Amino acid sequence: MSIRHPAVGFGTPSNEFQEWETIPVYFHGFEGLDTSRGAFVDSPEFTCFGRQWTLRIYPGGRTDSDDGVVSVYLRNMSEESIEVEYGFTVKKSDG
């Protein structure tokens, strides 16, 4: 069963960020990933807003993270820079 909650907005969005895209990226088998601090996994590259991206996930956090932290980074793999607003959604494996 999947439960969808509405987006929560805070403040007034700037006029610069009017277009939104949603790209699902799945890390299957998360429980089997190395949880040592500093160990990471990169997603395959995907395209959004005409640029190439990856997600880098540190299941045990970066080397300077506290215990119990998972770090996720959106990485622009294209040569051109871009300013974006982004967010992440985490789902249980059964939902």
Image (tube, rainbow, N blue to C red):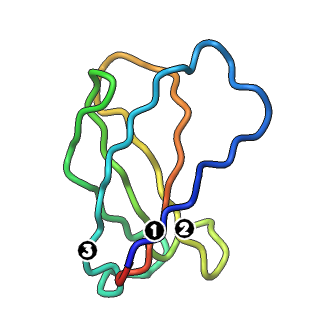
State the residue at coordinates (53%, 47%): 87
Residue at 54%, 20% (x, y): give it. Answer: 18
Q: x, y percentage for residue 12?
A: 76, 26
Q: Quadrant of residue 33?
A: bottom left
Q: Nearer the viewer, residue 71 or 49?
A: 49
Residue 91 lies, with reference to residue 10, above or below; the image says below
Residue holding disc 1: 38
Q: What label does residue 28 carry, if any?
A: 3
Q: Tell me which residue sits at (30%, 56%) in the image.
A: 25
Q: How far is disc 3 from disc 2 in space, using C-alphas?
A: 23 Å
* Of pointers 1 and 2, the one earlier in the residue sequence: 1
Q: Amino acid at mark 1?
A: Gly
x, y percent for residue 24: 32, 52
Give, as a three-letter code, the residue at label 3.
His
Indicate the amino acid at tag 2: Thr
Q: Position of residue 13 (x, y in %)?
A: 69, 25
State if disc 2 and disc 1 touch (CB < 8 Å): yes
The kind of secondary structure element at disc 2 is: loop
Measured as percent of width and height from the top left, residue 41 is found at: 31, 64
Q: Which residue is mark 2?
A: 63
Disc 3: CA contacts within 10 A as few (<14), some (14-19) or many (>=20):
few
Examine the rendered structure and indicate whether residue 39 appears above or below residue 23. Answer: below
Q: Residues within 10 Å of mark 2 (few under 14, many from 20)?
A: few
Name the quarter where the N terminus is drawn: bottom left
Q: CA distance from mark 3 to mark 1?
A: 20 Å
